[in-house]
Amino acid sequence: MEGYHERRTAAGGGEASDTVSPATQIDTNNSVSRKEIEQLVKDFKRSCGDYHVSLKECNPEDTVVGPSVIRLKFRLGRGQSLQGLSSHLEDIGREMKRTGVIIQQEPNSDELLLDVPRLKREKVLFKDVIACLPKVTSPEQLYFPLGRTPNGKDLIEDLGQLPHMLVGGSTGSGKSVFLFTMLAALLMTHPTQDDLQLVLSSSKLEDFIHFEGLPHLYSGSVISDAVEATRVIKDVIFEESERRGKLLAEARVANIVEYNKIATEKLAPIVVVIDEFADLADQLETKKEQNAFYKPVQRIAQAGRSRGIHLVICTQRPEAKLVPSTTKAQLNGRVALRVNDGISSRMIIEAPDAQYLQKHGDMIYKNGDTVERAQGYLIEIPELDEIVKDVINGKL
């Protein structure tokens, strides 16, 4: 999971960036002692031996302490099967007195990573990472912070390049706070409605109540009714999307990035956030109504990138029937917070690990072949309200 490349994004360019904090080794973190690390390594080695798993090496000095996990690095002996170790992992974790240990493979290496939950986690704060965002030089650049990895990297993505996301997590997993940090970052870098438009939809009005009053809201308010959501999303697709397609064709450019380089009036990106996607769909009683909801969502996923329309689908119940495969295939950015079972985990990240995550922002982020464990940033509600207030009053 540490194979996430160090990248910087040029203005108008296409790749995400990391800002890198020094990795926290065992002798620099007061809340995790050297003694605790050495005991974990000792217990891991002994437990592997008990289950006839041979380790080539596992050195306490190579351990990295992250905000939410202690990451042990190790190698299996020759001829040893990773599947064999994985089949005993729950028992090995029990003998280490830790619930929810996860193994990941270092890309292009025989090194393996064992993430052991910390007994006392550290908070990573939104206010500490917001200054690390790359400078926005054109509206379609939608930088936001994802989380901090165990070895100290602040993962920063550009929604404009993803271009869509699927976020899954059960109650208490930190899904709402993740959305709040994303939206707060977008508002701070796009403080006027000419820079950004938002469609915020949830089955419960209170989920996005903190964003009421923003001039950025495409429909003028937060949406909590499925019929209204269908109407607004259809409007985004069948009217605004088609209008933008004609503008691009007339300008003889392929996408919003090229258009905004030459246009006098730049096109503002539109970010469509559908929280509690499954619950919202459940409000629609007939098959016809459901199709009317799913079809424009699918069209955003298929045609949105070039026209600057981006989709963020979030759900507590990541079931295949609720996110059709044709839509899911377009959702390149995947954030799995704590989910209830392996089936839900596979639905989001094609791997059965997310049910072992801790709550409150512990996540696995997947984008193509890139997979990262990270701790999401914490934004307090008063801090969020202050940002929204400053945006509404034109102080940013």
Image (cartoon, helix red, strand yellow):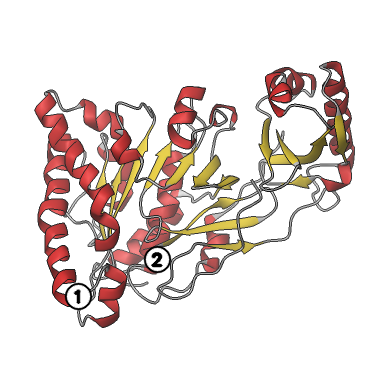
Residue at 22% of width from left, 26% of height from top? 282
Q: Nearer the viewer, mark 2 or mark 1?
A: 1
Whole-Å distance between the Cαs marked 2 and 1? 32 Å
- Dot 1 alpha-carbon crowd within 10 angstroms: few under 14, some 14 to 19, many 20 or more: few
Mark 1 residue element:
loop
Which numbered marker is on residue 188?
2
Viewport quadrant of the N terminus: top right
Query: Which residue in the structure is indicated by mark 1?
Result: 252
Q: Is residue 259 left or right of residue 40?
A: left
Q: Residue furthest front?
A: 79
Residue at 75% of width from left, 46% of height from top? 65
Q: Mark 1 is on which residue type?
A: Arg
Measured from the top left, where is residue 104 in percent x and y? 66, 37
Q: Depth check: 238 or 75 in front?
A: 75
Residue at 20% of width from left, 83% of height from top? 264
Occupied quadrant, residue 118: top right
Measured from the top left, where is residue 315 in percent x and y? 36, 34
- The number of numbered discs placed on residues in the rendered structure image is 2
